[in-house]
Image: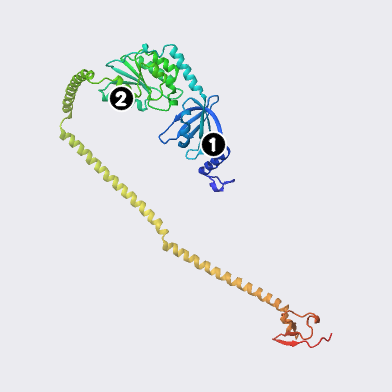
Amino acid sequence: MEPVDALPGPKPISVADLDRKLKRTLESSVTDLWVEGEVTSFKAPTSGHLYFTLKDEREDASIECVMYRASALRARRALVDGARVQVRGKATLWAPRGKLQFIVDAARTAGRGALLEALEQLKLKLAAEGIFAPERKRPLPTDPRIIGVVTSANGAAIHDIARVAFRRGGARILLAPALVQGADAPAQIVAAIDRLERVNGVDVIIVGRGGGASDDLAAFQDELVVRRVASCLVPVVSAVGHEIDVTLTDLAADIRAATPSQAAELVVPEGHHRERALRDLTGRLRRAVTQHFLENRVVLERLQAGLGDPRAELGDRQQLLDDLEQRLRDAAREAVSRRTEQSLRLQARLSAQHPKTVLERARGDFQRLRAQLQAEGRRTLEQRSARLALLAGRLQGISPLAVLGRGYSIALGPGGQAIRDAQEAPPGTVLRLRLHRGSLPVRVEKDIA
């Protein structure tokens, strides 16, 4: 595979650099805007910041929003799940998760949201049909035999119900698992109620979930779920686990509990209601233990009869141990022999690669190469010497010094330049005559030209 650095094109940047570029682009281009939409998934943690999703109910579009504590104090009342609001702020990118956010610094009410309006219309419709009428409410059984529970199998609600029921004396709990959040939750809740209703002996049903945001409770506002709770043949306790908001399921159920734990407290009796059952269970347990003891005694006697003489069994085990020990010795000898043979082969190969042997071979190669290098050096030196002598002879032939050797001289001016014209040396000029050997100073007395 070709290294990344060798690939053509521009050098790639890191994810963090990309996030920073996107953040700068968004914050410089999408700022100080007013946006209108419907509030969903509203959360107000203890930090004082507000988190919610602004949804366009006409199109499948939404954006996550955050309002910091300094601005939240002025706009808290306008931000409610289902409310339609107008918010002002700027877009940004939250780098730790690469998530697009809209930072809100102001909010104002823009009317009722579509979801809130639809929920109110459904509530009026069901109330007109008598679904929420108090006279339809049924009392809870005083000593239920089986308590049906419709909730998530992995949520905290079933654990809270089981814990409270055990603390109050125990109860038989039958779970019909169902999704309690999401698009498929209403159909699964209805199907779970159907299954529990067909079980003989179920005296009461708890329908609910743990706490969550108002947007997470949509399944318990669904018309199918509300109607099924109202038409159930056994009493239903609604335990949605959200004390602030009252769902339509709470209104349709026979009893509303603020939390799953409170639902268990309402359904499971304690005290003298459990004493009779406890005495009955104690007697059944005593009889079961006695029967179990008798059965185990029969089994023990049968095993003792089939065990036979322990010394014979011990002798068989000892003989098996001796056989295994002999097989282990044989296997060890064979392994040692195989390893010894392998070691000898490796030793022979290692001797051929011993540093002394390798060094001797290298020394012979070095002597041969040095002799070749010396011979080549002498031959090259002789060739270069001959060429140098030839070039020196040619240079001597054209040297000015050779001309001076035939009796000529060169007149040099005060600056050391050669005098080529008498005009360059007027009378009184001091010249220097360069001879074959040495030089003579002269003075120009007069111009005889």
Q: Tell me the quarter of the image containing the C terminus.
A: bottom right
Pair 2/1: label in front: 1
| Residue at left offset 42%, top offset 17% | 226
| Residue at left offset 27%, top offset 24% | 166
Of the residues shown, which amino acid type is indicated by label 2?
A: Ala
Circle 2/circle 1 CB separation < 8 Å: no
Who comes first in sequence, dot 2 or dot 1?
1
Distance, label 2 to label 1, CA atoms, is 48 Å
| Residue at left offset 75%, top offset 83% | 411
Residue 162 is marked as 2
Instruction: Judge by depth and name the residue closer to the eye, 347 or 221.
Output: 221
Residue 198, picture quadrant: top left
Say what secondary structure mark 1 lies in.
strand
Instruction: Judge by depth and name the residue closer to the eye, 129 or 111.
Output: 111
Residue 16 is marked as none
Q: Is residue 61 above or below residue 420?
A: above
Q: Is residue 283 above or below residue 422?
A: above
On the image, the x and y values in percent for residue 333 come to 29, 48
Of the residues shown, which amino acid type is indicated by label 1?
A: Lys
Instruction: Judge by depth and name the residue closer to the eye, 413 or 275.
Output: 275
Say what secondary structure mark 2 lies in.
helix
On the image, the x and y values in percent for residue 65 come to 49, 33
Residue that carries the numbered disc 1 in the rendered image? 90
Residue 409, picture quadrant: bottom right
Q: Is residue 329 above or below residue 107?
A: below
Q: Local crowd at mark 1 within 10 Å, few (<14), some, or many (≥20)?
A: many
Instruction: Judge by depth and name the residue closer to the eye, 389 or 246.
Output: 246
User: Colour scheme of this structure image?
Assistant: rainbow
| Residue at left offset 41%, top offset 23% | 245
On the image, the x and y values in percent for residue 390 come to 68, 75
Q: Local crowd at mark 2 within 10 Å, few (<14), some, or many (≥20)?
A: some
Residue furthest toward the front? 74
